[in-house]
Image (tube, grey):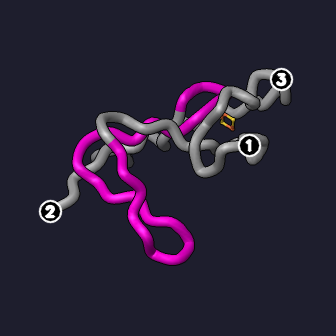
Amino acid sequence: MNNATIKASRNGWYQVSGSFTLLDSAGKPYTTTGDIYLCRCGQSKNKPFCDSSHKAAGFESTVQAPPPPATP
Ligand code: FES
């Protein structure tokens, strides 16, 4: 069973940790070991993986989950 955690970095990649399977567009699995870093800026030349091109591109994105709803 897959049990992954995905974390958006500040101005960069998505870090994927835990147990997961990454599939390409044809459904073929990538061989991965440990954490992987997925591009979310669209500039990587090694998609779906981050190659640090986000730095030269000046990609800026800080995402934050909304706070939990207030309890009455
Ligand atoms: S997030 Fe790093 S190259 Fe796109």
Q: Is residue 68 magenta?
A: no
Displayed-image quarter of ligand 1: top right
Of the image marks 1 and 3, the number of the one nearer the N terminus: 1
Q: Is residue 35 left or right of residue 61?
A: left
Q: Residue at x 43, y 38 (%)?
A: 36
Q: Residues within 10 Å of mark 1 (few under 14, many from 20)?
A: few
Task: Indicate the position of residue 70 as horizontal and vertical percent values.
Answer: 36, 44
Task: Indicate the position of residue 18 as horizontal and vertical percent values.
Answer: 25, 42
Task: Indicate the position of residue 35 as horizontal and vertical percent values.
Answer: 36, 35
Q: CA distance from mark 1 to mark 2?
A: 31 Å
Residue wearing tag 2: 1
Write the start and end of the magenta stretch as one range: 9-32
Question: Which mark is nearer the camera, 1 or 2?
Answer: 1
Residue wearing tag 3: 56
Please determine whether, in this image, residue 32 is positioned above or below residue 2. Answer: above
Task: Indicate the position of residue 33 as horizontal and vertical percent values.
Answer: 31, 39
Q: Quadrant of the N terminus?
A: bottom left
Q: Is residue 54 left or right of residue 39?
A: right
Looking at the rendered structure, the kind of residue marked 2 is: Met
Q: Quadrant of residue 39?
A: top right
